Amino acid sequence: MLALIPLALSLAPYLGRWLGGALGSGSTDAAIGAAVATQAAELVRTVTGTDDPAEAAAILEADPAKRADLQIRLAEIANARETAYYAEVANARQQTIDLAKTGSSLAWGAPLVTLLVFGLFAYTVVGSPPADVGTLETIKTVFIAACTYWIGSSRGSAAKDERR
């Protein structure tokens, strides 16, 4: 049945994003990829009535309405996975906000990392800078990123979420 996956991808290439699993979703990547592959292949088999990829392609070529219906249904699979992925991301963000509101020690992570970065940057400016130019550039880049977090939109976005 999984031999039908290339045909499904030719009709709905955006499904490919999910065949390797959800980006950044941890240990469930393989399960998500397998579930999407199984759903897509089963759908192609159901619509065309065959497990043979060449025969399925011929059936879809002969019946444009069936092909269009299959494309819509494959898009629905991708859309459902996309919606679930963004719900997972929103849930993770909400959990982080909840930790900060409850006074969890994890809420001190960003300020402590920033303090460490500022200290490292101050040491390189006041003390002896590293001989390796790459190391110095890395320290400067991390310093700029820390400043951007606190001054830029990331901290503003976090503050906005805290007001909700």
Image (cartoon, rainbow, N blue to C red):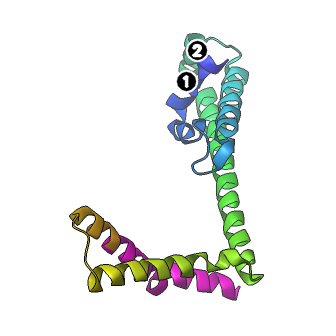
Which residue lies at the image location 64% right of the left edge and 41% below the top edge? 29
Q: Is 41 left, or right, of 129 in this rendering?
A: right
State the quadrant of the C terminus.
bottom right
Front in this rendered view, residue 84 or 117:
117
Q: Indicate which disc residue 146 carries.
A: none
Q: Magenta stretch: residue 143 in it?
A: yes
> Is 50 situated above or below 107?
above
Circle 1 SS class: helix
Do the CB atoms of the residues marked 2 and 1 lie less than 8 Å apart? yes
Front in this rendered view, residue 72 or 45:
45
Q: Indicate which disc residue 53 carries.
A: 2
Q: In 3D space, how far apart are the residues under numbered discs 2 and 1 (Cα atoms)?
A: 7 Å
Q: Main secondary structure of the magenta part?
A: helix
Which residue lies at the image location 67% right of the left edge and 38% below the top edge? 73
Circle 2 SS class: helix
* Residue range (magenta): 140-164
Front in this rendered view, residue 61 or 73:
73
- Residue farthest along the front direction in this orientation: 128
